[in-house]
Amino acid sequence: MTFLTNPHRFGAPPPPPPEFESIYESKQALTTVQPTRMIDWFSGCSLNAERWFEQCETGCGAFAMVNAADEGFEVQAGGTSANCSLINYNGVRHYCECSSVWIALVRTTTCVSLLEVGFIHRQDIPGGNSTNSKLRETRSFTCLQALTNDGVASTVTSTCVATSCNWYLSRTVLTACNNAFFIDGSAVVCQTTRLPDQPLQPHFREFNNGGGANGARIKYFEAYNV
């Protein structure tokens, strides 16, 4: 009688054959660095705390998923003028200042909001001089604004898109020569001065610009290196 015996029963199995590569190796050559890409739909019960950091920069604020269909995550900045709340990566700067893209779907909820969304190097007070590339919406101006900052000063350009409480999709493409801003698929501004010059992290901030209840909402953010 012949018994079938597992040849590896009494020892460690042999290593896998060399033709089985990792997923990373299968997708691209090891001489190429894979871009860092992040997508967040801001859905579920709470914010992804392993990714995002919540901060009341000035005064008090609140952070919560909105209890309504397809309304995303809300950042509130207290009920007093100049209160400021934000979410970012807490100093983890994955994105290159001269070859990256950010995309966001956002809106304000009141006329006293000052919403800022995009990339920033280090967190600072509104109007500060941290390296950044972002879009701003404030009812102090009739149109959305594009901002870039090289750590010394900002270039601020008004777009042709009026402020409102409506959702809008914003995208910015960063290169060494310019930062091109798009809103709802249309090019609105191309900044060529005061461009960011340091690695960047995602940034979403709400500033109370006039007292009373206020907030800003985000339901999609994407960022990647080109």
Image (tube, rainbow, N blue to C red):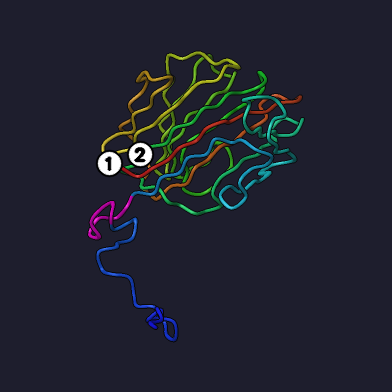
Task: Work out whether residue 190 or residue 194 is closer to the camera in this orientation and state it.
Answer: 190
Figure check: 205 above or below 55 = above
Task: Name which residue type carries label 2.
Answer: Leu
Left or right: 100 in relation to 38: left
Please tell me which residue is depicted at 57% across the width and 16% down the height of the picture: 166
**What secondary structure is the stretch in magenta mostly built from?**
loop
Q: Which x, y percent locates residue 192?
A: 30, 32
Task: Work out whether residue 65 or residue 198 is closer to the camera in this orientation and state it.
Answer: 65
In magenta, the rendered stretch is 26-34
Which of the labelled discs sits on residue 19, or is there none?
none
Quarter placement of the C terminus: top left
Callout 2: SS: loop
Q: Which residue is mark 1?
A: 176
- Comparing labels 2 and 1, the label whose residue is closer to the camera: 1
Task: Work out whether residue 129 or residue 86 is closer to the camera in this orientation and state it.
Answer: 86
Callout 1: SS: loop
Occupied quadrant, residue 84: top right
Residue contact at pointers 2 and 1, CB within 8 angstroms? yes
Quarter placement of the N terminus: bottom left
Distance between the Cα atoms at labels 2 and 1? Answer: 8 Å
Occupied quadrant, residue 189: top left
Q: Which x, y percent locates residue 119?
A: 46, 40
Figure check: 186 above or below 73 = above
Left or right: 226 in relation to 163: left
Say if the magenta span includes residue 123: no
Please tell me which residue is depicted at 64% across the width and 33% down the height of the picture: 73
Q: Which residue is mark 2?
A: 195
Q: Residues within 10 Å of mark 1 (few under 14, many from 20)?
A: some
Say if the magenta span includes residue 29: yes
Figure check: 179 above or below 38 = above
Task: Work out whether residue 89 or residue 67 is closer to the camera in this orientation and state it.
Answer: 67
